[in-house]
Amino acid sequence: MTMASEHAAAGNAHSDRAPVRPPDDPRAALLNTQLKKVRYRADALIEVLHAVQDIYGHLSGDVLRTVADALELPPSRVLGVATFYHLFTFEPRGEHTCTVCTGTACFVKGADALMQGVSEAFGVGQDETRADGAVSLLQARCIGSCGLAPVALVDGVVVAKAKPDQLVAALRAAGVDAPAADGDNEAEAPRRSDDEAAAVVPGGAA
Amino acid sequence: MAGVTLMIDGVEVEAPAGESIMQAARRAGINVPGLCQLDGVSVVGACRLCMVEVAGTPRPRPACATTVADAMDVHTDTKELREHRRVLLQMLFAEGQHICAVCVANGACELQTLAAEVGVDHVHFTPPAARLSMDLSHERFGYDPSRCVLCTRCVRACAEVEGAYTWGVAGRGREAHLVADLGQPWGEATSCTSCGKCVSVCPVGALFEKGTSVGERRVERALVSSLTARRQRESAREVLK
Amino acid sequence: MSKPRLATVWLAGCSGCHMSFLDLDEWLLELAQAVELVYSPIADVKDFPENVDVTLVEGAVANADNLELLHQVRERSKFVVSFGDCAVHGNVSAMRNPLGDPGELVAEAYRDAVTQLHGQLPDPERGVVPALLPRVLAAHEVVHIDAFMPGCPPSAERIRTAVEAILSGDSPELAPELRRFG
Amino acid sequence: MTNAVDLFDLTQKEREAQAAYRTTVLCCGSTACLSGGAQATQDAIASALEERGVQQDVRMVATGCMGLCSRGPLVKIRTRGGEDVLYADVDEAAGRTIAEDHVVGGEVVADKQLSLTHPFFARQERVVLENMGEIDPNRIEEYIARGGYTALRDAITTMTPAGVVEVVQRSGLRGRGGGGYPAGTKWGLLAKAVSDQKTVIANGDEGDPGAYMDRTIMEDDPHRVLEGLALAAYATGAKQGYIYVRAEYPVAVRRLEQAIRQAKRHKLLGKNLFNSEFEFNVEIRIGAGAFVCGEETALMASIMGQRGTPVLRPPYPTERGLWGHPSMINNVETLANVPTIMRRGADWFAGIGTRTSRGTKVFALAGKLRNTGLIEVPMGITLREIVEEIGGGVPDGKAFKAAQTGGPSGGCIPVEHADTSMDYDSLLALGSIMGSGGLIVMDDDVAMPEVARYFMRFCMDESCGKCLPCRAGTFEMHQLLDAICEGRATAATLARLEILCDVVRTDSLCGLGQTAPNPVLSTLHYFRDEYEARVVPPKVAAEATVAATSERSA
């Protein structure tokens, strides 16, 4: 017996586990399908968390508890894994996203200027989502298009040999407006990625 | 089990095979500094304070996680090791807010004692300007994250000895921190059995009994170690029966 | 040969280190024979003098006055000792650092706290109180320090051992049991 | 397919089918060219051919990376009996022109043509990338038509496992992931381990910023990875394989999944391969954004669904690995070498490169260069040859200052050492490492303390936090580099930085921490004057410290 099948067998014993609730939420149904697909194997935690993020857009405390119960893992383990990997996020992303590659080639060719240009044009900080939820400015580890540096993604579409104005134009075209001038955005603190994580993880080092 | 003979700091030491350098050294009266190692729970080799030089190896090895071997030549207290330990301890002080004067563990703190022993009389790194709030939600215990040294003794005692898995490490790198269950206040962590093992193994004042004031730490650190040792002895007897 | 010129200064601290110093009782008489005390909070001297041999610095650097005095101390002393945990690493004085903006702290302490009777803010502009630094610093973050004497406060024995060593020109490094923080 | 004869049949059929076309249009469909508009180019060519009614005479192939990413989209025209013609910067209009003038009219479009004798191509030697730009990665038939899976067949049907280990050993192949550990030795260790639950793992967690060799191999020649892994399994007695892929590479995941399905269908994976007792299955595991998972023990933790924190070695994975069973981890590029080594022989492979570094190395050539992209060169080529001949030199009248190899674990090689041979040992002697193959060229606009700070920031963000020296040390080093870059540092700061480098390098638990100081050490070594130029007197530094704290708390 190979290891994979050994673990599968261990998982099969639990395939009658209670389904994710609420049953009338289509997202819960999708998650159930995913859990069944991995046969409730504890070692599939990362795959399940990817699925949760695909389905719900982000990871929340409630769903993490559900996952912990379904995979029969201690909640502290689930949170530990979820917060270890950078791709998991604890807050909903903005309607539009601009992701600047910060790989070495892009660094050498001015990724900083791209970041700053977008940040200033739309009033959104690095790794932040603007208070109105219109746009998130994120950074990516090398996306492996170094020959085209500097590179950014606007709503997932690669912009090669990018210039700041080009990104600003692309985001404007996608429908992102400049920040409100009356300082409303100042009054309302920007949603930092960490804040929501802190809600899930109170007492966490901010 | 066959024994081995090795040299530790120029002293000939006999040790059973499978023992760690740290254990062998201790029996020979040589105290190798360390924070994450705790008898009775698994070895992680993470604090790196117990690094020792082993002749013939390119870099120092953690004494807690290196098994003795015959004819091994170990040095635990060279000038270089001492200097590294001083730097490492300073890093620990700078990671949190370690203010002995107002700490429950003052006078009974392993970090404080190590600093004095190794010769850390000031800290060259700047502590972070972070605001970490205490968790006093548990009815009997408190947790001050600013005093945590991430030795994970509590995590291992909770998982391996109590079996509750309440404590875990969340976050990564410098953001790594302890969490109870899904990060809710400790008092609301449903898996916690309030057994207090985590508090007893904490080398510093991060986990403490409520109602104890500066320098009043009372719990016995050897509790978990003796518990595990007793358990192993008893189960060995069971097998013999 | 003239006697060594000794000074002690009190920056942001509780004066506990100086109290501990005074705990040395009759040894203080011996010390008085051996050195000339040229500046100290327990002596009525207005300005920090020139040509000091040894200065003990109690307290952290928390405000503009502390900063100015410490620079003066360094310029005018041959050997500067961080005296007690506040000077050594900020200690209790630095506990405000994680709270951020000192302005809020001052407001809480002088105006907003329920225990406040007068509700009046000190005004650094009028020179009544010195302006707080954004962050409390250990002495060695500001100037070079020649020796460190931890403790909150350092015990009388510790002070005596250290000062005797320094005055006799020996290594000021303290034994493990005498260099514990707290 | 149940036996080796079928594989020949399939090969034959595919070759005949390909030969039936008069013209083949190979369009680069790699991620880089696609983001440069390759899909539109391809569509333009297809519709032009359709309008002219010649589409059935022309075979259109969306291939993997052709290498010269900075000049994409790239298109290659192959005519029966003629020489290949390569076109660069082919936008929609150019695609249409090429289709009409060249494919239909037989006239080469001179102004878009790029000579294949261009040093960028001529100086390369392709082993791992031999199929790049030649095959459609979506079709197993094309891989097989170029000799794919014959190495696996021949190994299983004619060789003992020990014989395969011996070939790999004799070839001198070393790990391409960074460390350069001899692959044959590693295979031998796993082969010796006694267990019926061994696993082999392909490490596709290419985390170095500025490197994309493994991504390209996985995306554009996925069967090569599978074949390499299957050979490793046969040689070592493993039944289960895993490919651990960065989540940032979704295309690689899709292509590998598809390749596994195809291989299973053709009985190249599964039970009784080539009618032998040998059984081998492969699963893909996806990371979630953690550089440290490139480290063997962290990678295994991640495969098991845990935090990717490294554990102490020994025991080594070949003794106690995945789920406690003996396991072996090879980098994707290492495995991709193996099928060719098996087909062409250990001696042939050992004949390429230098005495201690055999074979070729794939580099992701990037930074301040005229030609950037993916190259494969024999070990022992000099840095200068790569930069000036293949890379076409530094543009805009700027001077070549340094090249960075090995990413955050590597170092900067200054122009004075540009004539050094690119091999494991020479790079190590210069204070850098071969690394996984990122090669970033810098001109004199780039300030070295800032480069060091960039890499330290990376290591700090990627430290797993388990061991103290790496968790706190990378942070403290970054603080000091910040102080240096911002004019708050004294000479003492530099001294402290060097002590920290020593502590973090010596005492860290895993390779991430042990190598994190390298970019600092190498720039301090070669460009110390740049650091010293930023040092200020103590009083100025103290004032700046006070000012900086107020900025930070504001």
Image: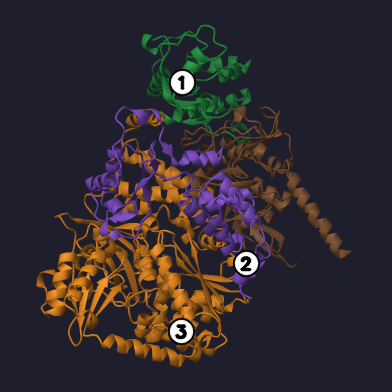
Chain colours: A purple, B brown, C green, D orange
Foreground residue among D248 and D366 = D248
Between the C-alphas of marks 3 and 2, the distance is 28 Å
Counting residues from the N terminus, which is met first, the one under dot 3 or under dot 2?
3
Q: Residues within 10 Å of mark 3 (few under 14, many from 20)?
A: many
Foreground residue among D332 and A190 = A190
Above or below: residue A129 compared with residue D262: above
Give residue A43's quadrant in the image: bottom right
Residue D494 circle label: none
Residue A101: image x %, image y %? 33, 52
Above or below: residue D471 compared with residue D81: above
Residue C104 circle label: 1
Residue D152 circle label: 3
Element at badge 1?
Answer: helix
Residue A194: image x %, image y %? 47, 41
Residue B69: image x %, image y %? 65, 65
**Residue type at tag 2:** Gly
**Residue type at tag 3:** Leu
Residue D324 circle label: 2
Asked if disc 3 and disc 2 are in contact, CB closer than 8 Å, the reply is no
Taking the image as shown, residue D186 lies to the left or right of residue B104, namely left
Q: In percent of the image, x 25 and y 61: which residue is there?
A: D36
Element at badge 2?
Answer: helix
